[in-house]
Image (cartoon, rainbow, N blue to C red):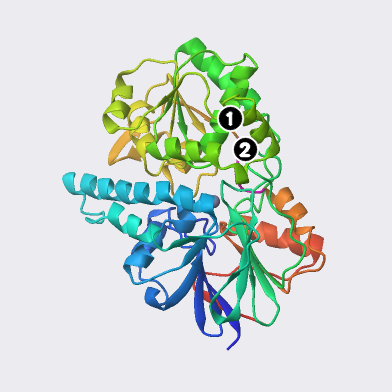
Amino acid sequence: MGQSIMFCGAAQTVTGSRHLISVEGHDILVDCGLFQGSRAESELNWKPFEVPPSEIEAAIITHAHLDHVGWLPVLVRGGFRGPAYATPATIGLAKISLPDSGRIQEEDAQHNRRHGRQDEHPDPLYTEEDAYAALRVLKPIHYDQMQSLPGGATFRFLPAGHILGSAFAEIYFANGERILMTGDLGRFDTPIIRDPAIVDHAEYLVIESTYGDRSHSKEDVVGKLESIVAEAAKSHAAVLIPSFSIGRTQELLYYIRQLQNAGKMPRMPIFLDSPMAVSATQLYADSVEEQDQDMKIALSENLSPLDPDGLILVRDREQSKALNARKGPFIIIAGSGMANGGRIVHHLLHRISDPNTIVVFTGYQADGTLGRRILEGAKEVRILGEQVPVRAQIEKLNALSAHAGQDEILSWLHGFKEPPKTTFLVHGEPPAQQALKAKIEQDLHWHVVIPSRDQKFDLG
Ligand SMILES: [Zn+2]
């Protein structure tokens, strides 16, 4: 029977990571992500899984972003009994992000029903309760700890440098060959967390390609943030920062703190309007196993690296709504990072038509998201069913990313001592994937495949 892999999601898209590995007839799912991009893509969340969930014997979750773990509640409700292995920090973050995701879906469904939106699903994809049920199948595995899998396979996690708890899954088959699943490949020298592990061998490699066609700008993030807040202070503007609650938000807080330490940050309130980000920030501060040297030093010196002066944590909705009446200057950091859900959507609806607003994007904006439309210069956008003109100033912190850029992917691949038999590119849009494939073929002469959704490959 041997081994095979089927790409059930994140195949020529950046969301919905779900890779089904079959070992001697035993199914192991690597990641169980939500599809979050365009409408057509998110519609896939409603489609039954490729095999009955009750037949999947184990899952491995590379990290806690919803496009990697956010569909687990549906899988569990459908009959998957676990275990789903993840690092302790990933489980810590999933305890925050999954119930939050269930809650948001319940609220959105309620909103759609109230506004009679026939074009939307009347029921949530899953509820907060479904999310809690999913948390019960998660089993913690530390980095480098070997764990057996069905079919005589074993695996271990290696640090991926992407977000807190993020890991590569290095899976060994009984025949001695291995497949390395990168999940999302992080970057070297980002603040707070450890760098990605260097890997020098795998017969098969599944690697993400979000930024396969470009390298990140070398722009000075702290410098650009400094000029944005200076401008906001001068014009009493509201700064809206759509931010991924996990990872990006903590990075932003870290940089704001650096500006303050350098005396370069005007005094203004910073509203962290995301209960999930509030809890995640606490976990970042507490997870010693995950932190890099600078973060450990800053903590040991009581520099509160993730707690800038003026930070106000907004937990409940009323407090969040009350911000509508507030005059600038101030900063609101809220999820989601691509403005396709979460409280930032309400702030954008309320303020994007006001020229005295600065919207600052902090990461990748997938095709089909509100963030992408705004960033591409739409003069008018549809938000929560309302057509609103865009008059706000739009900025982007270009150098911020939790994903390796093309040059960084290539230099990480150079760590391999010999080429994998096959390198599969996932988690990218087609132009990025084509560009990365060409680059790897040209520079390394490796065999590279871009799988399409539900395509299956024999491994050895
Ligand atoms: Zn991720």
| Cα–Cα span, label 2 and label 1 | 8 Å
**Residue 452 vs residue 220, the one in the foreground:** 220
Tally of numbered discs: 2
29, above or below 323, in the image:
below
Amino acid beneath label 2:
Ile
| Type of amino acid at the residue the image marks with label 1 | Tyr
Q: Position of residue 403 (x, y in %)?
A: 62, 48
Q: Residue furthest bottom?
A: 1
Image quadrant where one finds the C terminus:
bottom right
- What crowding class fits label 1: few (fewer than 14 Cα within 10 Å), some (14-19), or many (20 or more)? many
For residue 254, which numbered disc appears in the image? Answer: 1
Q: Which residue has dot 2 on it?
A: 192
- Residues shaded magenta: 398-404
Q: Considering depth in this image, is 454 or 385 the residue closer to the camera?
A: 454
Magenta span dominant secondary structure: loop
Report if the CB atoms under discs 2 and 1 are less than 8 Å apart: yes
